[in-house]
């Protein structure tokens, strides 16, 4: 990859995007990183497809809940409870995965961002690709979560039933009914706070990364790592676009999503954000490549409007006074 970080020493919003020469698409873990790579793959990558599939297949319990509220007979309430129970189990799985993110993102950032970031990224290309896989899942999950607003309504009904003394999971015989109910209610409160955000997985990654940066005083290192990931994704998509005969749309859309989430994370980690004149991230070039993204029916979630909306509504510094008017205009287009 050569001199990764030196490529970003000349900061400026209209500078060219440095090509780091990192073939992230085909990156494989080295023997030195294999142990951590395998652990994080099991915890954070392998569960992703089934979690997404369950979210895509979610069925609202609104009709059953409406009947139970309008006519609260035991039969209607049982039907509503049975309808929301699979959703509650699904949300527990989502929350548990988010907890794994919170625990393991710092392990990943510690390897990539402590010490010489330039050498870390060259040495740990497998973990860098794994980080990209996680960010891709985060984008996808939050996209599908926003498409299912009745999730919160279903869970609200479940919490209402808990308050009335009904709880679902069979309790351990050694735990009293009261204690079991308290534990379930506490978990329900935490899940409710988690899904209250439009983009809960992204928020968890942002909060976890920000806490890691603050605790370890690694703002510059993490920012440099994210800028390098952004640049790598940009050039991967750009090269795919130039090689249309061999272009696989799913590869380009993967890296567009990772590029967008990298910018959002950078904007939250760096004290000046991603949109200032001196940011190493070229917002104009990024927006242009998003707008030039070839649309395919299976990639609705990676449409220009969805990618741009993610950037607009999840950024921290876009509307700051320090953001050049030209950048604001590009982002608003």
Image (cartoon, rainbow, N blue to C red):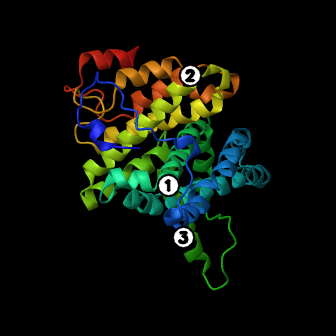
Task: Tell me how far mark 3 sits from mark 2, CA to CA.
Answer: 52 Å
User: On the image, numbered disc 2 is attached to which residue?
Assistant: 241
Q: Which residue is drawn at 39% across and 36% down?
A: 263
Furthest residue toward left = 322
State the residue in front, 204 or 119: 119
On the picture, is 49 further left or further right than 179? right
Furthest residue toward front = 2
Report crowding for label 1: few under 14, some 14 to 19, many 20 or more residues within 10 A (C-alpha): many
Report crowding for label 3: few under 14, some 14 to 19, many 20 or more residues within 10 A (C-alpha): few
Q: Position of residue 273 (x, y in %)?
A: 27, 36
Q: Is mark 3 on a helix, strand or loop?
A: helix
Task: Tell me how far mark 1 sits from mark 2, CA to CA.
Answer: 26 Å
Splitting the image into 4 quarters, where does residue 111 fall? bottom left
Q: Residue at x 35, y 25 (%)?
A: 283
Q: Position of residue 79 (x, y in %)?
A: 78, 50
Q: In which quarter of the image is the C terminus?
A: top left
Splitting the image into 4 quarters, where does residue 247 fall? top right
- Tell me which numbered mark, 3 or 2, is placed earlier along the sequence: 3
Report crowding for label 2: few under 14, some 14 to 19, many 20 or more residues within 10 A (C-alpha): some
Q: Is residue 319 above or below residue 26?
A: above
User: On the image, numbered disc 1 is attached to which residue?
Assistant: 127
Q: Is residue 236 above or below residue 97?
A: above
Tell me the tag on residue 183.
3
On the picture, is 110 further left or further right than 12? right
- Tell me which numbered mark, 3 or 1, is placed earlier along the sequence: 1
């Amino acid at each position: 990859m050569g001199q990764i970080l030196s490529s970003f020493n000349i900061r400026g919003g209209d500078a060219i995007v440095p090509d780091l020469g990192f073939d992230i698409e085909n990156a494989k873990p080295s023997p030195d990183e294999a142990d951590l790579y395998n652990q994080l793959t099991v915890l954070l990558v392998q569960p992703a497809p089934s979690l997404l599939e369950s979210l895509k297949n979610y069925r609202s319990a609104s009709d059953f809940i409406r009947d139970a509220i309008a006519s609260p007979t035991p039969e209607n309430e049982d039907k509503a409870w049975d309808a929301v129970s699979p959703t509650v189990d699904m949300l527990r799985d989502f929350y548990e995965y988010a907890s794994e993110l919170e625990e393991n993102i710092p392990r990943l950032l510690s390897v990539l961002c402590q010490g010489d970031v330039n050498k870390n990224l060259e040495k740990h290309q497998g973990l860098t690709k794994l980080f990209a896989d996680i960010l891709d899942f985060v984008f996808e999950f939050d996209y599908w979560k926003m498409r299912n607003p009745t999730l919160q309504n279903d869970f609200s009904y479940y919490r209402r039933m808990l308050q009335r003394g009904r709880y679902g999971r069979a309790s351990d015989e050694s735990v009293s009914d009261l204690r079991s109910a308290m534990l379930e209610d506490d978990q329900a409160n935490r899940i409710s706070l988690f899904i209250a955000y439009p983009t809960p997985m992204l928020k968890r990654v942002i909060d976890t990364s920000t806490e890691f940066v603050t605790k370890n005083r690694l703002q510059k290192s993490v920012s440099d790592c994210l800028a390098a990931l952004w640049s790598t994704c940009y050039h991967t998509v750009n090269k795919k676009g130039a090689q249309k005969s061999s272009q696989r749309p799913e590869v380009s859309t993967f890296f567009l999503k990772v590029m967008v989430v990298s910018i959002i994370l950078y904007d939250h980690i760096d004290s000046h954000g991603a949109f200032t004149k001196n940011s190493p991230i070229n917002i104009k070039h990024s927006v242009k490549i998003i707008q030039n993204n070839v649309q395919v029916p299976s990639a609705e979630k990676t449409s220009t409007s969805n990618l741009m909306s993610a950037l607009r509504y999840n950024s921290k510094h876009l509307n700051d006074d320090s953001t050049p008017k030209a950048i604001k205009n590009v982002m608003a287009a």
